Image (cartoon, grey):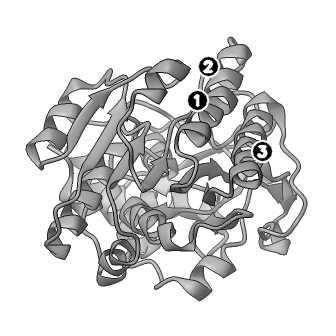
């Protein structure tokens, strides 16, 4: 079952789809966010009362997610997105949300990460020339910036640290190239970090507090956003896709202290957090003022996120077991 807390569209989400007629396809729908975002698309289309195809494409290592999406009327398609011929065989769609990519394992097999983060985007952009594309990216394309700066804006220089981040710049460049070549409308969605009750920075912190494990402080500040809000804003970016691409930082407005977040979990869980090291003067941050100006503000506060995550930890709810490694300052994942 897909958690309904991450699939509810708001009125603005439905309006965005109304402004973007045609079928919808999510490429890389089998990842951490893909199932809930695709289910949200299906719910929004249902609210529109229109007959549109909503398609989810992945290799589907998680068969339960595929079955859950099929149960809500999504067409589940198995495809190796590294194969140009397989991508060419995918159904037409006027609206594309691109979520495929690889982060973890980069240090051991960087060539695979580069293939996933540059060749796959090229295959998708070539196949869906003329469609609207919302392409997921990451705040990792930015350098570490002084905490007091509030993080880089979309117009600030990028400065990727490590091969994963560099390959993510490559992903963006592929979409930029095909947008320029074919006039494809693209929105580049720089996310940093989405919070679910099964994974994310807050889950990492809450679990460490609960287990009495030391929390490293070198990366002492973060940005977060509730996954449902991130999903809705991604869909709402479809009508803003343009050539050249529209670029958007997507995260919460606040620069959050890791030490303070751990303290809030400690108070909630009744465990004193343990820390290691001290805060550095800079961190991986994003300034999302543009997002907060043009989109309806996120509906879920940091306090509410902490409560949801703490309750899941107390109840020993199933977790994805995929730490974010937010503390990495060298870009190695």
**Residue 306 placed where, x, y %?**
39, 63
What residue sits 63% from the left and 43% below the top? 326
Q: Earlier in the sequence, mark 3 or mark 2?
A: 2
Residue at 62%, 75% in the rendered image: 254
Label 3's element? helix
Question: Helix, strand or loop at disc 2?
Answer: loop
Can you name the residue that lies furthest to the top here? 108
Spatial CA distance of label 3 from label 2 is: 22 Å
Q: Position of residue 307 (x, y in %)?
A: 33, 65
Q: Which residue corresponds to mark 3?
A: 173
Q: Are marks 2 and 1 in contact (CB under 8 Å)?
A: yes
Q: Which residue is mark 2?
A: 105
- Looking at the picture, does residue 221 appear above or below residue 153? above
Q: In this rendering, which labeled residue sits more in front, label 3 or label 2?
A: 3
Disc 1 target residue: 102
Relative height, residue 86 to residue 96 (above, below) = above
């Amino acid at each position: 079952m897909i958690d309904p807390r991450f699939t509810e569209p708001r009125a603005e989400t439905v309006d965005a789809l109304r402004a973007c007629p045609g079928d919808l396809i999510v490429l890389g729908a089998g990842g951490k966010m893909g199932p809930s975002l695709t289910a949200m698309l299906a719910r929004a289309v249902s609210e529109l009362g229109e007959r549109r195809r909503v398609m989810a494409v992945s290799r589907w290592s998680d068969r339960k997610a595929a079955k859950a999406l099929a149960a809500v009327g999504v067409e589940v398609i198995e495809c190796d997105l590294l194969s140009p011929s397989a991508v060419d065989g995918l159904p037409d769609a006027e609206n594309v949300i691109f979520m495929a990519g690889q982060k973890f394992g980069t240090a051991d097999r960087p060539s695979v990460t580069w293939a996933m983060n540059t060749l796959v985007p090229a295959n998708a952009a070539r196949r869906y020339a003329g469609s609207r594309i919302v392409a997921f990216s990451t705040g990792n394309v930015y350098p570490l910036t002084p905490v007091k700066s509030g993080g880089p804006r979309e117009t600030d220089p990028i400065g990727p640290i490590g091969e994963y981040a560099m390959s993510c710049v490559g992903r963006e460049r592929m979409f930029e190239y095909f947008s320029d070549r074919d006039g494809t409308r693209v929105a580049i969605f720089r996310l940093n970090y989405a919070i679910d009750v099964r994974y994310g920075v807050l889950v990492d912190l809450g679990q460490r507090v609960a287990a009495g494990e030391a929390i490293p402080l070198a990366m002492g500040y973060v940005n977060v956003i509730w996954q449902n809000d991130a999903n809705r804003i991604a869909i709402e970016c479809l009508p803003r896709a343009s050539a050249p691409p529209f670029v958007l930082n997507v995260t919460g407005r606040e620069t959050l202290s890791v030490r303070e977040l751990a303290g809030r979990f400690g108070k909630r869980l009744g465990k004193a957090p343990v820390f290691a090291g001290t805060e550095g003067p800079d961190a991986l941050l994003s300034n999302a003022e543009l997002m907060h100006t043009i989109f309806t503000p996120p509906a879920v506060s940091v306090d509410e996120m902490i409560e949801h995550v703490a309750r899941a930890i107390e109840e020993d709810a199933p977790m994805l077991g995929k730490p974010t490694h937010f503390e990495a300052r060298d870009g190695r994942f």
